[in-house]
Image (cartoon, rainbow, N blue to C red):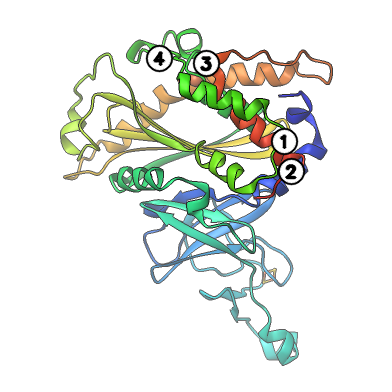
Amino acid sequence: MKPDYYLSEEIFRREQEKVFTRLWIFFGLTTMLADHNSFIARTLSGIPVVVQNFNNRLRAFENICLHRQNALQWEDSGKRPLVCRYHGWGYNAEGFAENIPSDAEIYRFDPKERSGLTLRSFHLEVIGKLVFINLSADPLPIAEQFPAEFIESLRSSSEMYDSEVLVARVRTRFNWKLAYENLRDANHPPFVHAQTLAKSVDFHAVIDEAQHRRSENVCEGAASGDRTRQMELLRSFSFGGPDTALNELKPLEWHGAVDRFGNLEHYYNWLAYPNLHIASGSGGYSFTLEQHNPVAPGVTELVVYWLTAKKKRPYPAMAAVLQASLNGGFRVLEEDIRIMEMVQKNLHAGAPLPRQGDYEYLNKMVEKWYSDLMDGDFEI
Ligand code: FES
Ligand SMILES: [Fe+2]
């Protein structure tokens, strides 16, 4: 797209408003929220959000104390009641400040003000073991964002996730859109991942002629204000399941300790628009989830989760298995990050526009849809 889409502060703000505060955004895993008082905290679109388990009810609140704005939960995840560490205000499952120490003696709020001390809450949806958040007060149904068969595929695969998970959070210096343009591009692995991923998977860029014609129709048409058509297009950006066959799947000792997802010797790949990527490079024995949270036009927070399929029996060395998979996975990620940071660093207002070929039909469709949305031709 035009360099401005990756560089401009104004466009970034508009994008946060039109995309990230309207769509359902992946937030975390239910396996990290299994116990009473367990929580996950993240910042989405500049808003700190906490999802907390209250006696097996998951609730999402703004992670800011109503007294003097201290963060209620400080860690990325953990287990403690929703109580502020500054002056001890404690919140219940409704987000209400149920316990204010020395309330009557030193605060003396009038009853009306006291009864309104409730945290801002957000809508939450759970698909299998995946938690999604919507920052809008009036969210679109999640089934308008994702096709039914995709939701089912996310549900059935994530049901197989084990509860032991390794999470890493890194700041990268590129615009989040570059990551997804790269993930929709099957022509880069033989070049970028020649020594890593491309050794075990033969990625081939192929032109799906029907999709290519569809993309040409979409891109050559005028900006479309037809919301039904635009939402249909949006749903086609999220898909997943078995991808290319693996060259070989080396049997590893821990494979015997887990209940594998599916039975195909394939690379699995799920893309959930706008910012979640899930992959299994081990034919369903393990998974990697990548969530890209935009922070600024040229800054993206990347949260990566490593986990295996559900353990059938205790496997004491699983932490080491996950650590090894993190080390291998990061090599591949770093190869992509390096390219995207290079692209971002070189971009400037007068940079040449991209020349995409026919195999890039999907990126072209996403870009057309996105520009229509950003130009105000339709609203989500
Ligand atoms: S800021 Fe939270 S109790 Fe004072
Ligand atoms: Fe890559």
Q: Residue under circle 4?
A: 203
Residue 181, picture quadrant: top right
| Image spot of residue 129 (x, y percent) | 37, 51
Residue 373 falls in image quadrant? top right
Q: Which residue does the numbered mark 3 point to in the structure image?
A: 359
Element at badge 2?
Answer: loop
Front label number (3 vs 1): 1
Kind of residue at disc 1: Ala
Residue 223: assigned label: 1
The mark nearer the N terminus, 2 or 4, is 4
320 up-or-down from 69: above or below: above
Disc 4 from disc 3: Cα separation: 13 Å
Q: Quadrant of residue 4?
A: top right
Mark toward the viewer: 4 or 3: 3
Q: Position of residue 275 (x, y in %)?
A: 55, 38
- Marks 4 and 1 sit apart, C-alpha to C-alpha, by 33 Å
1 and 2 marks in contact (CB < 8 Å) = yes
Left or right: residue 53 compared with residue 251: right
The residue under label 3 is which amino acid type? Answer: Tyr
Q: Which mark is residue 377?
A: 2
At x 83%, y 21%, the residue is 349
| Sequence-wise first label, 1 or 2 | 1
